[in-house]
Image: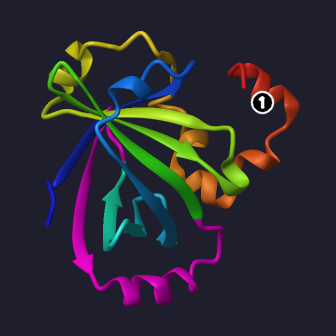
Amino acid sequence: MRMAVEIERKFLVVGDGWQAESAGSTPIRQGYLARSASAIVRLRIAGDEAFVTIKGKTDGLTRPEFEYAIPVADAEDLLKLCEDGVIEKVRHDVPVDAAPWTVDVFSGDNAGLVFAEVECPSEEAAEAVLLPSWLGREVSHDRRFDNASLSRRPFVQWSDEEKAEFGL
């Protein structure tokens, strides 16, 4: 099991300045089995590992998160049960001053989106984290950029006005 809470900030990425600092990448496919106002249940295949994750409601930058490893074959079968689309992306590890930044480059119906996220041990640490120059607008509190939302309403379905609002 991973941490019992998730504290993260999310930003759009501008340019490719992060690529020179990438320390590795992992292809990811994920879908959502259940979602309600209080929790979501996510399946993820990351490289040759698979996980089921339960995330609670966000309060500020914090939300409960419980993650459990499952067999990849089970995850493949369970992804077929996801009513909404499956998210496809490549996650790049990009450490910046010891902060564990990740950059997600989406493909499929979400091609064109590139996010950077940093997970922190506290909300205070999240507010104080060094922001790399390749970050664009912060979207931590905009639910349209949640992966669960993008599986239900992918980027390809966004209006030109919505895309322009974020310079996309």
Q: Position of residue 147 (x, y in %)?
A: 52, 51
Give the farthest residue toward the right: 160
Q: Is residue 90 above or below residue 113?
A: below
Q: Quadrant of the C terminus?
A: top right
Count of marks overlaid on the render: 1
- Is residue 49 visible in the rendered image? The answer is yes
Q: Is residue 111 above or below residue 52?
A: above
> Which of 20 and 165 lies nearest the eye of the viewer?
20
Residue 75 falls in which quadrant of the image? bottom left
The stretch in magenta equals 58-86
Q: Position of residue 53 (x, y in %)?
A: 32, 67
Q: Which residue is mark 1?
A: 162
Q: Residue at x 79, y 41 (%)?
A: 158
Q: Is residue 160 above or below residue 93?
A: above
Q: Residue at x 47, y 58 (%)?
A: 37
Q: Quadrant of the N terminus?
A: bottom left
- Is residue 153 visible in the rendered image? The answer is no
Q: Is residue 106 left or right of residue 60?
A: right
**Badge 1 density bin: few <14, some 14–19, many ≥20, Cα 10 Å:** few
Q: Position of residue 55 (x, y in %)?
A: 33, 59
In the image, residue 68 lies in the stretch drawn in magenta: yes
> Which of 87 and 4 lies nearest the eye of the viewer?
87
